[in-house]
Image (spheres, helix red, strand yellow):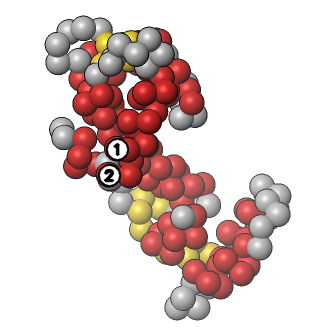
Amino acid sequence: MSPHENLSQEEIDACRETFLLFDKDRSGTIDQWELKDVLKAMGQAPSDEEIFRMISEVDDNDSNSIDFSEFLQVVARQKEYSSDSHEGDILDAWLAVGGQVSADGFSPFGSVDTNKLIQIIKGDFGLPIDIETLILETDLDGSGEIDFDEFKHLLI
């Protein structure tokens, strides 16, 4: 996988700055401890096994460290995983508010009553957001029901 497929030039530039920041010994590579520090700075908490796996997946020269191009591959994979995880979170939220999915577990269908959604957001979770206004802006057909696409738009 080419990191250029999943990363914008701006992201690549930010990766270069990050790489240089965490390449503390200026070796031109990041070892497992430096990579762990990078990912922690990105808000992740990888285990030592996950770090080892990440490095082994991209370490073309078996150096047990990664150079900048290998680092881009790690970041691109993490971005892809994060995106997939985000979709899963939305689907989980859809199910939590009474939405349905097909037997394969991946295809959402049906709709959720807006009153039920308001009750869950305000009553059950006690979130201090103006959910009524958000629903009015999202339920463009005024049906009083939120379908999955509207629900996804509501969350994003």
Tell me which residue sits at (41%, 29%) in the image.
Answer: 19
Furthest toward the top, the residue is: 63
Q: Residues within 10 Å of mark 2 (few under 14, many from 20)?
A: few
Q: Where the N terminus falls, by quadrant?
A: top left
Q: Are marks 1 and 2 in contact (CB under 8 Å)?
A: yes
Q: Residues within 10 Å of mark 1 (few under 14, many from 20)?
A: some
> Hey, which quadrant is residue 79 in on the image?
top left
Q: Nearer the viewer, residue 40 or 140?
A: 40
Q: Amino acid at mark 1?
A: Ile
Q: Where the C terminus falls, by quadrant?
A: bottom right
At mark 2, the secondary structure is: helix
Q: Is residue 53 left or right of residue 82?
A: left
Tell me which residue sits at (45%, 72%) in the image.
Answer: 149
- The answer to whether residue 121 is above or below residue 82 is below
Identify the disc placed on residue 26: none
- The answer to whether residue 91 is above or below residue 40 is below
Q: Residue under circle 2?
A: 9
Identify the disc placed on residue 12: 1
Tell me which residue sits at (32%, 53%) in the image.
Answer: 8
Q: Amino acid at mark 2?
A: Gln
Q: Nearer the viewer, residue 65 or 1?
A: 65
Q: Is residue 137 left or right of residue 46?
A: right
